[in-house]
Image (tube, helix red, strand yellow):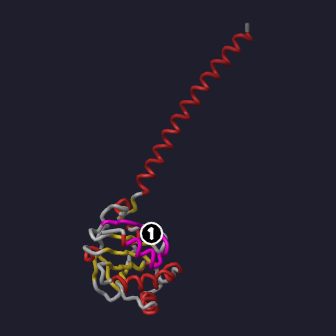
Amino acid sequence: MIKKYLLTIAIILLAFTIVFINLWKSYTTQQTNEIVEEEANTSENIPGVDLSQVQEGKLAPDFELTTLEGKTANLSDYKGKKVILNFWATWCPPCKAEMPHMQNFYENNKDNGIEVLTVNLTNMEKSKSDIEKFVKDYSLSFAVLLDEEGTIGMQYQAFTIPTSYIIDSNGIISKEIVGPMDEDMMISLTEGIK
């Protein structure tokens, strides 16, 4: 009789344990899903920057920066032209490899409604004189804008450099390119857009 009683208690305890484990799993899974969802929502936001704005097919967010010569320039100044918007730094080897191609492309296409607009990640440079020397050494004649605070580079997700955006004449981002481009690649990317 005692054996039956103990067996019944053991079965009841086992049943309660199974129910408890299933409820606990359900609860922790729900909590984990809520945390993952919250992280996914917040990963799109960096204070002061909306990363969801910069995507292929969307209007490129306008910005205003100072050129190396001290003039103010806006991305919207180039509306009506195709634009290669390039983010770079002087110490970046792939940027160094890309710049001669970019200069050649610019020289061959500046009269065809295509602009090259480069944004130096100035907040990552040692000094402004390094940028001036780089521009002189590479004989760059296109616009070089200075992102002194790093906010435009952050907004345009230039986490790996060079990062470039091909923007059509209506200001729509048609392509994001992470890594260096050569002249042939620039030609093919700009030919396919209006």
Return the residue nearer the eye: 126 or 101. 101
Q: Which residue is mark 1?
A: 177
Q: Amino acid at mark 1?
A: Ile
Q: Is residue 105 magenta?
A: no
Tag count in the figure? Answer: 1
Residue 49 falls left or right of residue 14:
left
Q: Position of residue 54 (x, y in %)?
A: 36, 63
Residue 61 picture location, percent across and down: 31, 67
- Residues 82 and 41: in front is 82
Looking at the image, which residue is at 30% across and 80% down?
A: 112
**Position of residue 55 measured from the top left corner of the image (x, y, whole percent):** 37, 62
Viewport quadrant of the C terminus = bottom left
Report the quarter where the N terminus lies: top right
Q: Please report the residue visible at 38 percent of the width from the left and 77 percent of the height from the top.
A: 147
Assess disc 1: are there few (<14), some (14-19) or many (≥20) residues with their C-alpha within 10 Å of its C-alpha.
some
Q: Is residue 188 above or below residue 125?
A: above
Instruction: Indicate the quadrant where residue 62 lies.
Output: bottom left
Q: Is residue 54 left or right of residue 20?
A: left
Is residue 176 a member of the stretch shown in magenta? yes
Name the residue located 52 percent from the left edge and 78 percent from the top edge.
94
Q: Read off the magenta span.
A: 172-190
Question: Foreground residue, 131 or 46?
Answer: 131
Q: Position of residue 101 (x, y in %)?
A: 45, 82
As displayed, is residue 53 above or below residue 125?
Answer: above
